[in-house]
Amino acid sequence: MESSVIDLRHFQHGSLPEGFRQMLIDVHADAYADQMEDPFHQRFAWFVDHWTGMDGFSCVVAYDADEPVGFAYGAPLAPGREWWRSTDYEPNNGYSSTYAVSEVMVRPGWRKQGISERLHEALLKERTEDLAVLLVDVTHPKVQALYETWGYAKTGEQQPFADSPVYAVMVRDLRG
């Protein structure tokens, strides 16, 4: 697919348009088409429902004309429920809040155009939290290296579900 003008649209908890859930599921199915036999990926709809139902949920969707080509979403973590705390990471000068980036994905035909970084930065641009956290499958070192270029540092590893991959826990200071 040749490069085109990509329009970024913002969505938030409480004002999601009809069909939004299915659009996320469809983009995921395309982005992970080679892994859809995996039961963990088959549960993506559950994760969509979980995240979109959280107070503070925010999402940025990239569109090529009217075609959704990728998205990034997340939500603030409740104080005391920050799953990254299981690592040895200690933020400089403390922290008071964390935003979890749950998903950043781009459909195959639109990859390698910088869309994932644009989505990610647009998602975090207006955040007021001190830290952003995300998980990266440890079998994808190039993805981890990409997040490091975006200011994240690996702080540990965890496997949040029995059937999920082991993930690198990555943290980024949003105040700096």
Image (cartoon, rainbow, N blue to C red):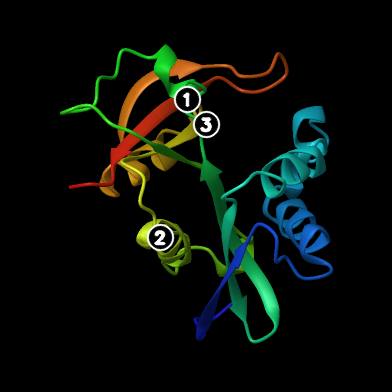
Other residues around mark 2 within 10 Å, as few (<14) / some (14–19) / many (≥20): some
Looking at marks 2 and 1 on the same chain, the residue that comes earlier in the sequence is marked by: 1
| Residue designated by label 3 | 78
Residue 5 in the image, given as x and y percentages of width and height? 50, 86
Q: Which mark is residue 4?
A: none
Distance from disc 3 to disc 1, alpha carbons, whole Å, reads 7 Å
Horizontal arrangement in the rendering, residue 129 relative to residue 4 (left or right): left
Horizontal arrangement in the rendering, residue 122 relative to residue 72 (left or right): left
Which residue does the image show at 72% across and 59% down from the upper left? 27
Of badges 2 and 3, the one in the foreground is 3
Looking at marks 2 and 3 on the same chain, the residue that comes earlier in the sequence is marked by: 3
Which residue does the image show at 59% across and 60% down from the upper left? 71
Q: Nearer the viewer, residue 111 or 100?
A: 100
Q: Note whether 175 is above or below 85 in the view shown.
A: below
Distance from disc 2 to disc 1, alpha carbons, whole Å, reads 24 Å
Q: Which mark is residue 117?
A: 2
Which residue does the image show at 51% across and 16% down from the upper left? 158
Type of the residue with mark 2: Glu
Residue 61 in the image, given as x and y percentages of width and height? 59, 67
| Residue designated by label 1 | 82
Q: Note whether 107 is above or below 135 in the view shown.
A: below
Type of the residue with mark 1: Glu
Q: Nearer the viewer, residue 56 or 92?
A: 56
Residue 176 in the image, given as x and y percentages of width and height? 17, 47
User: Circle 1 — which element?
Assistant: loop
Distance from disc 2 to disc 3, alpha carbons, whole Å, reads 26 Å
User: Circle 3 — which element?
Assistant: loop
Of badges 3 and 1, the one in the foreground is 3
